Amino acid sequence: MHSRLFIDGEWIAAANGAMFDVINPANEEVFHQVAAGAASDINAAVKAARRAFDEGPWPRMNGVQRAKILNKIADTIEQQTQQLARLEVLDNGKPLPEAVWDMEDSAGCFRFFAGLAQKSDNEAEEQIALDDPGFKTTVVKEPVGVAAAIIPWNYPLLMAAWKVAPALAAGCCMVLKPSELTPLTALELADICHSAGLPKGVLNVVTGLGPDAGQPLSEHCDIDKIAFTGSVPTGSKVMAAAANNIKNISLELGGKSPFVIFADADIEKAVEWVMFGIFWNQGEVCSATSRVLVERALYEPFLARIAEEAKKITIGNGLDEGVLLGPLVSKGQQEKVLAAIKRGLDDGARILTGGGVPAQHQNGCFVEPTIFTDMNEDSWIWQEEIFGPVVCIKPFDSESEAIKMANNSRFGLAAAVMCADDERAQRVARAFKAGIVWINCSQPTFAEAPWGGYKQSGIGRELGRWGFENYRETKQITTYISEKPWGWYLGR
Ligand code: TXE
C-alpha cells in the first residue's frame, strides 16, 4: 500500500509532513496512513503537469501511441483485479464481488478510451464548407491542457478511471485528488500508469482533505479543466473556484432518481431491479433509484414482496463470502443516513423494514436495508439524497401523475421505468427530465454511453465520445485562399 504523494514521477511526502488515517469501515480500525497534501503539494503537482503538457512527449504523441499505454494500464488492472478489489473493500466497505466488478469496469474504461484515442487520429482534422469560397476552414481537436480530477469515495478506482482514461486519451496531463475516505486505489493507479510507461508528470496524485487539497486545486490558475464528482454543496464550491480563471468544468453531483413501475410489470423483476437500484453498493450511488413509484394496483403486493426480500440480504464485512451489503464508507456517512431515517420518521413516514443498525453488526458503519412508505411528496426523505440503503415508495394512479411526481425534484441524474408496454416505456423515458434513463432495469452503466445529469445533478457528460470531448478543445483554422486582394483599406 502506498502512502505518499505521486508527483512528477516520484513518491514524496507532503511538504508539511502531515498524514491522515485510513479506516476500515467494517470494523472502524485504522489500517493505514497516507500523506495529507495541501496547497504547496498541489502547486508542485500542477507545475509538474504543466511542464509535462508544455514540454513533454505525451500531448505530442499520436492516438495510436497513447492507446498502447492506455491498453497496458488496462492489462495491469485486469492482472491485479483481486489485489485491487481487496484494497477497495478495506477502504470503502463494499462487497468483494462488487469491487471486482468495479476493477473490471475500470480496465474496460481504459480500453474503451484507448480505442477512441486510436480512432481520433483519423478524425483529428475536418474540413468544413463555408458560404464564402474565398476561405477554407479546417477544424482541429487538441487536448484541453492540464486537467484536475476531484473524485468521491463510492467507486474510488472507477471514478478515477472515468476521468483519467479520457483525459490521458485526449493528451491532457493531470492532477488527481481522491477522496480522503478512500485514497488507496488512486495511488495504485499512479503506480500502474507509471509502470505502463506513462511519462513523468503526466499523472500526478495528491491525497488530502477537501478544503486543504481539493480547494486549492479547484482555484489553481494553471489548471485548464476541472472534472468533479461529489455532493452538490462541494460541486458548487468547485464551480465558484473554477470561475477564478474560467476553467472548463464538468460536474457530476447528487440525485434522487425515480423508478416508475406500472401495474403490468412482472413483480419478481420489479422487486429485483428496485432492490438493485438502491441496495447495490449500500445505496452509495449517485444514480441510485431511491424514489420508487408503483401503480396502485400493484402497490400492496409489491410492498409485501420487496419487504420480504430486503430482510433476506446478507449484511457483513465485504470480504466475507455471500455478503451483499457491506458497511457504509464511514462513521460520518452512517450517522448521516441514520439521521435521515430519523427525520423521515419525525415527518410521519412509515418504515416497512429496516431503519437501524443491524443487531449483529453494532461495530462498523452498517445500516439495515430500509424501506419507507407513506411520506408526503414534499417531505425531506422523498426529496433529498440520503446516499445509503434507504428507499422511499409511493403509489400513483395514472401515467401523467407518475411523470409529474418523477420530475418533481431539483435533481435530474437518472430515472427508470418498468412496464410491459414498450410504447408506454418509450414515452415515459422521453418525458423524464434526467440524463440517464433505464427501461426495465436500473443502474447498468457502460463506458460507451454518456453519463451525467439535468438540473442540479450536474454539468456536462462523462464516458463515451461525449466524455472524450470534455478533454479536447476545438480549434478552427481559416485560410484565405482567394487570389483577390481583400480591398478594405487598400485599393478603394
Ligand atoms: O462529498 P464531497 P462527501 C454526496 C452524498 C454524500 C455527500 C457528502 O450525499 O453523503 O455527498 O459526501 C472533495 N473543494 N455524494 O463529503 O464533499 C473531497 O475531498 C474541492 C455524492 O464525501 O462532495 C472529495 O475528494 N474539493 C457523490 C470530493 O470533493 C473538495 C459521491 C467529494 O467530496 C472540497 C460522494 C472543496 N472545498 C458523495 N471539499 C456522487 N455524485 O456520486 C471536499 N472536496
Image: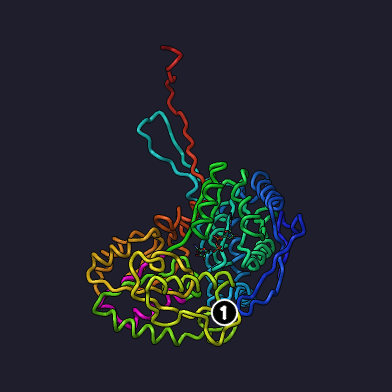
- Is residue 396 or residue 459 the one in the foreground? 396
Residue 215 within the magenta-colored segment of the rendering: no
Packing grade of label 1 (10 A; few <14, some 14-19, many >=20) is many
- Please indicate whether residue 82 sits to the left or right of residue 431 in the image: right
Residue under label 1, please give it: 96
Residue 271 within the magenta-colored segment of the rendering: yes
- Please indicate whether residue 58 sits to the left or right of residue 280 in the image: right
Which percent across, then down, holds residue 266?
Answer: 29, 81
Which percent across, then down, holds residue 31?
Answer: 70, 75
Image point 38% across, 38% down: which residue?
A: 129
- Is residue 203 or residue 175 the one in the foreground? 175
Which region of the structure is painted magenta?
Answer: 256-279
Image point 60% across, 63% down: which residue?
A: 179
- Is residue 389 or residue 264 the one in the foreground? 389
- Is residue 350 or residue 432 the one in the foreground? 350
Which percent across, then down, holds residue 286?
Answer: 47, 65
Image point 62% across, 68% down: which residue?
A: 182
Dot 1 amino acid type: Leu
- Colouring mode (rainbow / by chain / secondary structure / one colour): rainbow
